[in-house]
Structures are given as structure tokens and as C-alpha cells.
Amino acid sequence: MEPIIKDSERNMKEALSHLSDELKKIRTGRASTSLVEDIKVSYYGSYMLMKEVATLSAPEPGLIQIKPFDRNSIADIELAIRNSDLGLSPINDGTFVRLNLPPLTEERRIEFVRQAKKIGESAKIALRTVRGESWDKIQKMVKDGSLTEDDKYGGEKKLNELIDKMNSEADKIVAEKEKEIMSL
């Protein structure tokens, strides 16, 4: 039963890591290269991530600067940003692509908080799915006779403690992002 619990914990930690990665893509009051690093850019007939074709930096709180490794790809980078759902207009000066991030309105901040909470809820669903799969494995082991009823209830208790811990961690991650979004 212990391998099942450890496997569950590892999968739940992966879900929390994914939650953190997804929340990085939500815009806050200051510029962050994580907004654009995973945008797919058409690069000589294949698609690559922005972070693989350019150097990304945020030299000012309201500016993201993108310097392509290959100057010929600057138009492709510009097009990829325009086609993304960021709603930003890139400025191409021949060497860099600059993205000026306008200050967020209160309405926009609230919208981003809603988006963060939705992503957080998806992570909690993933956590519950992992718990459910582990619980099914434990019940199957009881039916097979490799676990006793007492072990089953001990496993259930451990799974419940684990899911409670991971849910509170997910809530904490979302609350931190919410605080970051709402801060001016």
C-alpha cells in the first residue's frame, strides 16, 4: 500500500507544479517573460517555443523585450504574438520586439483572478482524480486478498490526509497569485 501512497503524492505534487506553471502565464501588474515564453513561433517550417528562438527580458515593470537569436525570425515572432490571446501589440524595431504592457484596470484584474481560481479548481479536480485512482487500487488489493480491511482504512486515512494537505497547498498557491494580481 505504501507504494500507492507515495505514487499518489508524487502525482499530486506534479499537479501542483502544473498549477504553478499555468498561473505564471496569467498577467499581473508587472511584466514577466513567462507571459510569452511558451508562445509557439513558426521557425523555418516548424513550431518552436518563444524561449527557444529568442532571449526574453523584462527591463522595466511595463515592458517585455524579445531579442531573436536569428534576426530573420523577427517577423515570425511578431506574428506569433499578434495571433496569441494576450491582446498585445508588438513593436518591431529591427533588432528587438518590444511589448508595452498597459496598466491593468480593476475590471481586468478581477477577470484575471477569476481565471486563476478556475485554473486552481482544475488542479483540485486533478488531485481528486489521483486520490480516486489510488483508492481504487487499494480496494482492488483488498479484493485480491493482498491487503486487510484494517490496511484499507489506514490507506483511506492516509489518502484523505494527503488530499487535504495538497488542496490547502493549491489554495495557498492560488491565493498568492490573487494577491499578486490585485496589488498595484
Image: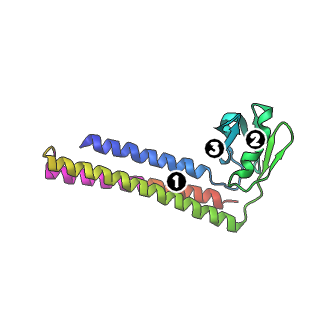
Q: Nearer the viewer, mark 3 or mark 2?
A: 2
Q: Which residue is mark 2?
A: 76
Task: Pick whichever, 69 or 57, lies toward us.
Answer: 69
What type of secondary structure mainly makes up the magenta span? Answer: helix
Q: Is any atom of residue 59 visible in this view?
A: no
Q: Is residue 144 left or right of residue 85?
A: left
Q: Is residue 101 left or right of residue 4?
A: right
Instruction: Kindly state the secondary structure of the residue where label 3 is placed.
Output: loop
x%, y% of residue 161?
32, 54
Query: In the rendered structure, which amino acid carries the disc numbered 1?
Result: Ile
Quadrant position of residue 176? bottom right
x%, y% of residue 81?
73, 48
Q: Which residues are magenta?
A: 147-168
Instruction: Kindly state the secondary structure of the residue where label 1 is placed.
Output: helix
With respect to residue 2, does 122 lie above or below?
Answer: below
Farthest residue in the bottom direction? 107
Task: Pick whichever, 86 or 161, lies toward us.
Answer: 86
Residue 80 painted magenta: no
